[in-house]
């Protein structure tokens, strides 16, 4: 999920629509409301955030450090004025990158992936057994062959692989795939997506690599 922080409703709604077309959930905050949320939100909600976009607002310069107290997700500032002083001030306050508006959501996602690679010092993909999952939105591969998946199933596989070796709950998966403020979708839809994903993996691999335990959640690993 991408969190957009801007005092203008038009900007927040616009990016929600643009990211939605890319299959990425997002939500928007006014800077003052966001400051309270980032300090009090549950850890599971914070963990569901893939990146923070900081736009216009009087408190924008104080937000990156508040984010860093809770999350290591990339923080990208959106600047509307070609000012060196403003850009340097944004970096000084703790952002990871500054982009000039207008900017396409795909560019933002590419920058987020690049920041994550630098932070984690990992390649653009993760291998788990014969499964290769990419960080740039491409379909995964199994035994070097493209394994095409609908975007929800692909993102669930990406999330499970990113958390390989530890169990994640249905709520955590839902928050990562749909966003923590989506009230139009029932959380149980996750079970349907996972069931379809597991069936496809079982057909391709000959077995199911996803382990599930009632009340504990899901886990993918390779022994």
Image: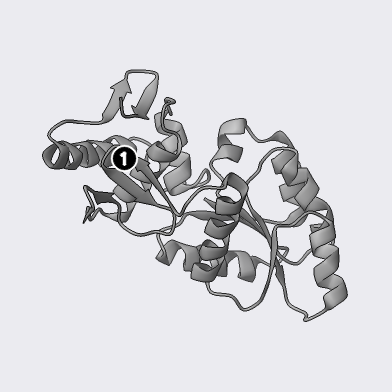
Q: In the picture, which quadrant includes the C terminus? A: top left
Q: Secondary structure at mark 1?
A: helix
Residue that extends furthest to the bottom in the rendered view of this protein? 82
Residue at the spot 49% in from the left edge and 69% down from the top edge: 106
Q: Position of residue 170 (x, y in %)?
A: 39, 31
Observer-nearest of 28 and 204: 204
Observer-nearest of 177 and 121: 121
Which quadrant would residue 204 be assigned to in this image?
top left
Q: Colour scheme in the image?
A: one colour
Judge whether 183 appears above or below 202 on screen: below
Query: Is residue 18 found left or right of 153 in the rendered image?
Result: right
Residue at the spot 25% in from the left edge and 53% down from the top edge: 149
Q: Position of residue 157 (x, y in %)?
A: 34, 43
Residue at the spot 47% in from the left edge and 51% down from the top edge: 123
Q: Position of residue 135 (x, y in %)?
A: 44, 54
Judge whether 93 appears above or below 89 on screen: above
Q: Which residue is mark 1?
A: 189
Query: Is residue 176 found left or right of 140 in the rendered image?
Result: right
Which quadrant would residue 6 be assigned to in this image?
bottom right
Q: Position of residue 111 (x, y in %)?
A: 57, 63
Query: Is residue 44 found left or right of 164 in the rendered image?
Result: right
Which quadrant would residue 185 be assigned to in this image?
top left
Q: Residues within 10 Å of mark 1 (few under 14, many from 20)?
A: few
């Amino acid at each position: 999920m991408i969190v957009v922080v801007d005092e203008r409703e038009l900007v927040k709604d616009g990016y929600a629509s643009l990211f939605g077309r890319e299959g990425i959930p997002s939500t928007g905050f006014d800077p003052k409301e966001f400051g309270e949320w980032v300090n009090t939100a549950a850890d599971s909600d914070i963990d569901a955030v893939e990146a923070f976009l900081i736009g216009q607002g009087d408190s924008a310069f104080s937000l990156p450090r508040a984010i860093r107290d809770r999350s290591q997700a990339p923080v990208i500032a959106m600047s509307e004025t070609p000012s060196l002083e403003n850009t340097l001030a944004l970096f000084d306050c703790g952002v990871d990158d500054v982009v000039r508006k207008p900017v396409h959501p795909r560019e933002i996602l590419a920058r987020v992936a690049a920041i994550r690679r630098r932070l984690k010092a990992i390649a653009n993909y993760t291998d788990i057994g014969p499964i290769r999952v990419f960080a740039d939105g491409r379909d995964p591969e199994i035994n070097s062959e493209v394994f095409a998946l609908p975007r929800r199933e692909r993102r669930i596989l990406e999330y499970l692989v990113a958390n390989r070796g530890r169990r994640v709950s249905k709520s955590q998966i839902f928050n990562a795939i749909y966003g923590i403020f989506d009230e139009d979708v029932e959380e149980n839809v996750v079970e349907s997506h996972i069931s379809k994903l597991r069936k496809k993996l079982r057909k391709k691999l000959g077995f199911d690599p996803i382990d599930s335990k009632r009340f504990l959640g899901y886990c993918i690993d390779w022994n």
